[in-house]
Amino acid sequence: MTSLWLQDRSPGPTTELPQGARYDHVVIGAGITGLVTAVLLARSGATVAVLEARHRGAVTTGNTTGKVSLLQGTRLSSIASHHGMRAVDDYVTANREGMDWLLRYCADHGVKVDRESAITFAAGTEGAQSVRSEFRVAREAGLDVELIDDTELPFPVQAAVELPDQAQLDPMPLLDALADDLRARGGTIVEGVRVTGAGLVRPAVPRGGDITVTTERGQVTAGAVVVATGMPILDRGGHFARLTAQRSYAGAFEIDEPMPRSMYLGADSPSVSLRYARRADGTTYLLVGGFGHEVARGGSERSHVDDLLTWTRRAFPSARLHARWSAQDYSSFDQMPYVGPILPGVDRVLVATGYAKWGMSNGVAAGLAMSAHLLGGDIAWARSFRSSRPSQALSLPSAASANASVGLHMARGWIKVVTSTDPGTPREGEALTGHRGGRPVASCTVEGTTHTVSPVCPHLYGIVEWNDAEKSWDCPLHGSRFSADGEVLEGPTTSPLRPM
């Protein structure tokens, strides 16, 4: 389950956490959002440290499909339905500025980029209606889109909309360039150190004093903190209750059929993403992605992977799998990302999340907005991204429904463990939950080793479910994920599952 981008990567240079050090800015997370923000802040002469729990690109950025486009499936029409065209205009402006900055940066630092058209397509009637709606909204937002009749796809489509001159890339050379740039400007990157919390040294003076950043290996202090961890790891602001966590799947295939050149994204359900990827050895792969679901709520994860493989081999009969992987993304209930202060008035702790699978442009836009905020500037479009925006009131019914579902999954999980017997030793690749001596217990067997942990997620005490595709424990409440032996993989949690 290693992405095409992360294959054959050697570990980067290690840096010890400077105990007790003080920085102007600490950025938590070394994906595209964190590293772009850090570079922008370092350009001002500020002292900057990036703290990463695993390695750069370990989570969403290293598992993305690497598309950089202003045509994003049916995203613009979805935003319009929630907010109207003013928000769409702000969203397009933000993503255009993010995309332009990214492409200039890649050109200046020798990061290879392919320029291709982006096409949203539909094979079914309902999807075709969504495609036409997206075309109308995109046109009104000033994008040079066209409805087209013919595509390169090996099956008929009912509708398709095209936006030329978009981009695709391998995200890891970009992250490497950003990391080198940051270090050259005096910045610090510490990988393999998990942040567990942050609090003001003088909480009675919210606008004064430094912020203490606590990690598993000690503390540092900062004038400001940027949380760029996908789902914010700090619960202040309650973003975990305003986002849905979604997993999707991807595969890289060699094919004998003609390779599609454009970047495709289906408007049907399940949605399918296509692009090509040319590697350094000259091999060109077809990347197929999609078949997503909410974390730990879509039944067998392996069945979603099987659906992707079946779809690919039906559309491209010669397809030979080279790599497969998955990614986790977060969407807000009102469809707009959250970028800015974690709470109103808390101007020195910023978050960025809710990109809904479009982090390559949104992540850069977030970096532009957050660095401007911290350096005393103001970007007009960023106001539509603030987590305290008044328009959230319109999404309250969706939020209430989603959080009722969270309560239902919590109840079901606890009922399951208290009514099940001791799980014993599961078969290879399988897992069981139950109770032992009155305590919840979960066991799995992976590569001949049986691991036994508490199934209680440390975040808000939901019961984790076994992910049979990735051999992980996933929490259905807010998307925290753990390895077979209980170590944190991603999500809002900062603590592992307790060993039993």
Image: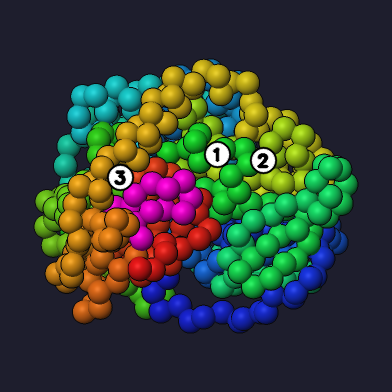
Residue 452, picture quadrant: bottom left
CA distance separating discs 1 and 2: 9 Å
Q: Is residue 266 above or below residue 34?
A: above
Characterize the magenta stretch by its predominant secondary structure.
loop
Give percent across and percent down for residue 196: 60, 60
| Residue 387 is at least partly visible in this image | yes
Q: Are marks 1 and 2 in contact (CB under 8 Å)?
A: yes
> In the rendered image of this protein, does residue 186 appear above or below residue 154?
below
Q: Which residues are magenta?
A: 454-468
At label 3, which amino acid type do we have? Trp
Residue at (45, 78) in percent of width and height: 9
The residue sitting at 25% across, 74% down in the picture is: 450
Residue 66 lies, in percent from the top left, at 45, 55
Secondary element under disc 3, as helix, strand or loop, is helix
In this view, the residue in front, 415 or 149, is: 415
Query: What amino acid is labelled 1 in the image?
Result: His
Vertical relation: 375 (above or below) 259: above
Per the image, the residue denoted by label 1 is 239
- For mark 3, does the 10 Å Cα neighbourhood hold few (<14), some (14 to 19), or many (20 or more) residues? some
Q: Which residue is mark 3?
A: 414
| Disc 3 from disc 2: Cα separation | 31 Å
Name the colour scheme.
Answer: rainbow
In this view, the residue in front, 439 or 215, is: 439
Find out whether residue 46 is within the magenta segment.
no
Which mark's residue is nearer the viewer, 3 or 1? 3
Task: From the image, tell me which residue sits under label 2.
Answer: 342
- The Cα–Cα distance between marks 3 and 1, rounded to whole angstroms, is 24 Å
Mark 3 or 2, closer to the camera: 3
Return the disc, 3 or 2, that comes first in the chain's sequence: 2
Label 1 secondary element: helix
